[in-house]
Image (tube, rainbow, N blue to C red):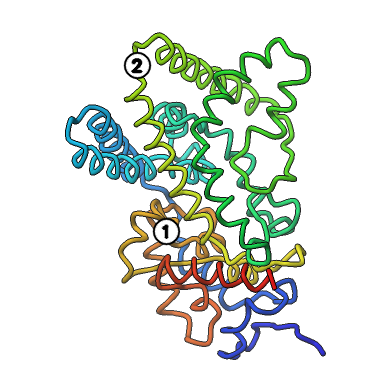
């Protein structure tokens, strides 16, 4: 029986059930793609004032709250400050996604500024995402074994989900070792730098992904950022080892940064439906249907999917659109495209339902 679906003349029931069939069989909906391109042309220019203000305010709030969490004598207020620090630093760190997409000439100095403000302090320099995330958006790579940011989680065993979260808890320790120990060792141990580049220099979830060594200007930027991160990590290790940075304060900082990475990992769990079980190349429409928007009226996505990440499916349609334009683009497309359009299928009410869907899928695969 032919189970292929096309969206040239969408049927509402078929669209609602689209992600339950073989995604690689879904053809592109030309009307949706055309509307996405034509209705948003004026939204493409990034607004530097928005980017810089958002980043700086988020970072100032985050670092101030972190300092309070480490020094307040009241446990209750310290916890409140810690929660604020996690949310604000998570928002500041999330701009790495924008850094990987923007044309740097349109936002002069923003990549360097973000690295100084967030990337180096959090030990996630921009090279860990640039040159990696673009592969996730490649038409022939998304959802395949060559996609560094994709796993068929919906068809994997239930134990994979808690493991997925636990690994993010350990991220701060791993990053300190990566830059504070392994980077210096790679200067003297033959072959170690190649291993670091291939396996430990990417914000990816696909364990089979191996990164290529950078070249030219990208290599020079990489070396500068890696050197800065290494100096920062070694300094932290020395300050803690000598007692200059009290162990208690360091432990609080680690807990808060773990919270940042855990929150990002939870957001990653629901960024897609992870339904490409066959690992085959997919149309843009199929990729869209395998991805998630969580638009208003839901409020909490502002916190757990900041900097435009609540419109992740729309971002896969228009990856070059600045984060501050996504809400308006969604409003225009929602109004222009009829209820029969697959555009509306990718919108979900919130985090709990998405997590429950993923858990049900993994439980079903365990049978």
**Residue, disc 2:** 245
Q: Is residue 30 above or below residue 244?
A: below
Q: Is residue 88 left or right of residue 183?
A: left
Residues at marks 1 and 2 touching, judged by CB atoms closer than 8 Å: no
The 10 Å Cα crowd at callout 1, few under 14, some 14 to 19, many 20 or more, is: some
Residue 221 versus residue 16 in the image, above or below: above
Q: Position of residue 271 (x, y in %)?
A: 52, 60
The residue that mark 1 highlights is 43
- Residue at 58 percent of width and 33 percent of height: 127
Q: Position of residue 67 (x, y in %)?
A: 26, 29
- Which of marks 2 and 1 precedes in the sequence? 1
Question: What's the CA distance linking mark 1 and mark 2?
Answer: 46 Å
Along the line of sight, the residue nearer the viewer: 238 or 286? 238
Q: Give the residue at x 44% y 52%.
A: 322
Mark 2 is surrounded, within 10 Å at the Cα level, by few (under 14), some (14 to 19) or many (20 or more) other residues, namely: some
Q: Is residue 218 above or below residue 46?
A: above
Identify the residue at horizontal 70%, vertical 83% (top origin): 5
Q: Secondary structure at mark 1?
A: helix
Q: How many marks?
A: 2
Q: Which mark is residue 300?
A: none
Q: Residue at x 51, y 73 (%)?
A: 346
| 243 on left or right of 197 | left
Q: Is residue 74 left or right of residue 208?
A: left
Which residue is more in the foreground, 306 or 80?
80
**Residue situated furthest right in the rendering:** 1
């Amino acid at each position: 029986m032919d189970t292929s679906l096309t969206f040239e003349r969408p049927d509402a029931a078929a669209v609602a059930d689209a992600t339950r069939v073989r995604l690689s069989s879904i053809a592109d909906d030309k009307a949706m793609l055309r509307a996405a391109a034509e209705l948003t042309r004026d939204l493409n220019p990034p607004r530097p004032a928005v980017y810089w203000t958002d980043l700086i305010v988020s970072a100032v709030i985050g670092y101030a709250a972190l300092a309070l969490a480490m020094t307040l004598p009241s446990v209750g207020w310290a916890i409140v400050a810690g929660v604020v620090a996690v949310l604000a630093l998570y928002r500041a760190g999330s701009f790495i996604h924008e850094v990987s997409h923007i044309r740097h000439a349109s936002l002069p100095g923003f990549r360097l500024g973000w690295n100084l403000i967030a990337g180096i302090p959090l030990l996630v320099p921009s090279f860990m995402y640039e040159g990696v995330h673009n592969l996730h958006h490649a038409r022939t790579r998304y959802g395949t074994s060559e996609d560094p940011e994709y796993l068929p989680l919906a068809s994997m065993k239930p134990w994979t989900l808690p493991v997925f979260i636990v690994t993010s808890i350990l991220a701060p320790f791993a990053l300190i070792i990566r830059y504070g120990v392994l980077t210096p060792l790679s200067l003297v141990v033959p072959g170690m730098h190649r291993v670091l580049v291939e396996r430990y220099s990417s914000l990816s979830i696909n364990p089979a992904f191996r990164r290529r060594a950078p070249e030219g200007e990208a290599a020079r930027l990489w070396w500068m950022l890696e050197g800065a991160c290494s100096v920062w990590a070694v300094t932290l290790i020395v300050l803690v080892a000598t007692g200059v940075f009290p162990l208690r304060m360091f432990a609080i900082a680690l807990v808060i940064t773990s919270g940042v990475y855990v929150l990002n990992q939870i957001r990653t769990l629901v960024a897609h439906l992870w339904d490409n079980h066959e690992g085959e190349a997919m149309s843009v429409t199929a990729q869209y249907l395998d991805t998630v928007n969580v638009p208003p009226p839901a409020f909490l996505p502002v916190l757990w999917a900041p900097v435009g990440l609540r419109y992740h499916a729309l971002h896969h349609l228009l990856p070059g659109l600045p984060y501050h334009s996504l809400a308006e683009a969604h409003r225009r497309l929602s109004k222009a495209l009829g209820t029969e359009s697959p555009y509306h299928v990718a919108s979900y009410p919130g985090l709990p339902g998405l997590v429950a869907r993923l858990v049900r899928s993994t439980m079903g695969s365990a049978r």
